Image (cartoon, helix red, strand yellow):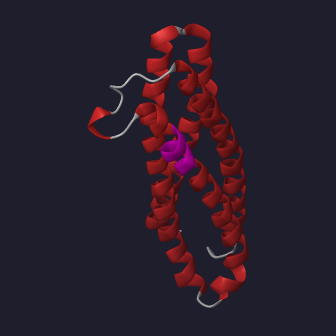
Amino acid sequence: MSVKSYLLILFHLVPWSLGMGAVFYFAFIAVPLANRFLTGETRVKFIRWNIKYYSPFFLLMLSIVVVTGAWRLTDYKIVLGLQYFQDVSTVLIIKLCLFFVVYILAAYQSFGLGLKVTGQGDKAMEDTVDAAVVDGVFKKMRWIAIINLIVMTATAYVGLELSRIPYFQ
């Protein structure tokens, strides 16, 4: 395997790992930290700040994973030729469907829920938002993050199945 192939794998796995880390932080560190140690306006600001930076970062990492995965598939297409569709298509379709679920949930998390509490444009984070609204959004976003962790793990497993296709011979 060439250095280019190793770099493509690295450029695919690093954003995936960073995205998984962001989701894990959001679901299992930020939420319990806010619930246990913070109260009142400080808690609401902490939650809003986490939502403001978590959502775009996670979507960026997912987008990089999509692009680098497509680059990686180009190697498969070149080496396998017409055999590519027979060997790769079923596994790839499963992986892309799982990843589509993750991406749709992340987009809903960011645009459907996150903007309700962070605001948008120049006035973002300046308005006051009711603590009950922030708590409701944060709880929904946490559950979506947990679902995303599970589906991203399944996607990684399918990706490992994809990597077992004998093309490096």
Depth order, front residue of 110/166:
110
Q: Can you tell which quarter of the image residue 161 is in?
A: bottom right
Q: Is residue 94 left or right of residue 109?
A: right
Above or below — where is 167 with respect to 82?
A: above
- Residue occupying the point 64% across, 29% down: 139
Which residue is at the far left? 122
Camera sees residue 2:
no
The magenta stretch is 106-113
Residue in the foreground of this view, choosing between 33 and 121: 121
Across and down, in percent, residue 21 comes to: 56, 37
Residue nearer the viewer, 91 or 6: 91
Residue 8 visible, this angle: yes
The residue located at (68%, 67%) in the rendering is: 162
Q: Residue at x 63, y 39 (%)?
A: 145
In the foreground, 21 or 4: 21
Quadrant in which residue 81 is drawn: bottom right
* Residue in the picture at 47% in, 69% down: 71
Left or right of residue 116: residue 160:
right
Q: Is residue 54 above or below residue 99?
A: above
On the rendered image, what quadrant is the C terminus found in? Answer: bottom right
> Is residue 101 found inside the magenta-colored segment of the image?
no
Q: Position of residue 13 (x, y in %)?
A: 54, 52
Would you place residue 79 above or below residue 131 in this image? Answer: below
Quadrant for residue 57, please give it.
top left
Q: Main secondary structure of the magenta part?
A: helix
Quarter the N terminus occupies = bottom right
